[in-house]
Image (spheres, rainbow, N blue to C red):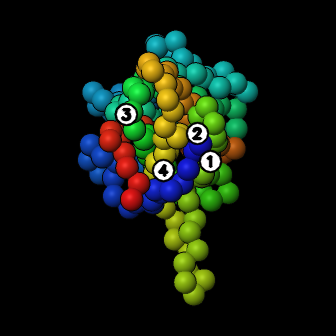
Amino acid sequence: MVSQRVASTRRRGLPGIARATLKPAPAPEGASEGPALRSPSPQDGSASRPGRGAHHDADFDRIYSGVVSLSTENIYSFNYTSQPGQVNAVRVYVNSSSENLDYPVLVVVRQQKGVLSWQVPLLFQGLYQRSYSYQEVSRTLCPSEATNETGPLEQLIFVDVASMAPLGAHYKLLVTRIKHFQLQ
């Protein structure tokens, strides 16, 4: 089951990214912003078609950068093997330079037994009607209950990134595994 037991919004940059790389200036289509960055582009066979989503087999601990719009969404699939008795969680970080609350970047995470979704920017209502807008949001997907499996179990996670923005919204995505996860 997907849980928001450990959820946070952060004002700091994504782990491993210098704040300077989070500038709202868009990179040219298909251009890389660093060795750990991979943009969906026609060169790697993952070009988006209007009205359709581009599917990407994705790697943990790699930063993905892209643009989504009314006609384009990106779907990333992450798979890993969990061992019996091993408890791992997955952390999903999303950053968007868009400040347009009318057309946020929408993030949907699908696991075997649950769905979790949020938007970036995330609008948080504080005390005294004060609003806070967060351009970066992260969520921890708590592992499902331990099973009595005797062998390794394949896990598959889909992260869908979309927006209804007519001209596109830029985002960065990072998915990491948290080993030895424990709630206290």
Of callouts 1 and 4, which one flags the residue occurring earlier in the amino acid sequence? 1
Say which residue appears at 65% left-offset and 52% top-offset.
Answer: 103
Across and down, in percent, residue 67 comes to 54, 36
> In the image, what residue occupies the spot 56% across and 60% down?
122
Q: Amino acid at mark 2?
A: Val
Residue 28, percent from left and from top? 43, 30
Tell me, for residue 86, which label it has, or none. 3
Q: Which residue is mark 2?
A: 109
Question: Residue under circle 4?
Answer: 139
Residue 168 at x, y percent in the picture: 60, 41
The label on residue 117 is 1
Answer with mark 1 or mark 3, whichever residue precedes in sequence: 3
Mark before the other along the chain sequence, 3 or 2: 3
Secondary structure found at label 3: loop
Crowd band around label 1 with a 10 angstrom C-alpha radius: few (<14), some (14–19), many (20+): few
Query: Which amino acid lies under the numbered mark 3 shown in the image of this protein?
Result: Gln
Q: Nearer the viewer, residue 163 or 149?
A: 149
Q: Quadrant of the C terminus?
A: bottom left
Question: Which element is circle 2 on?
Answer: strand
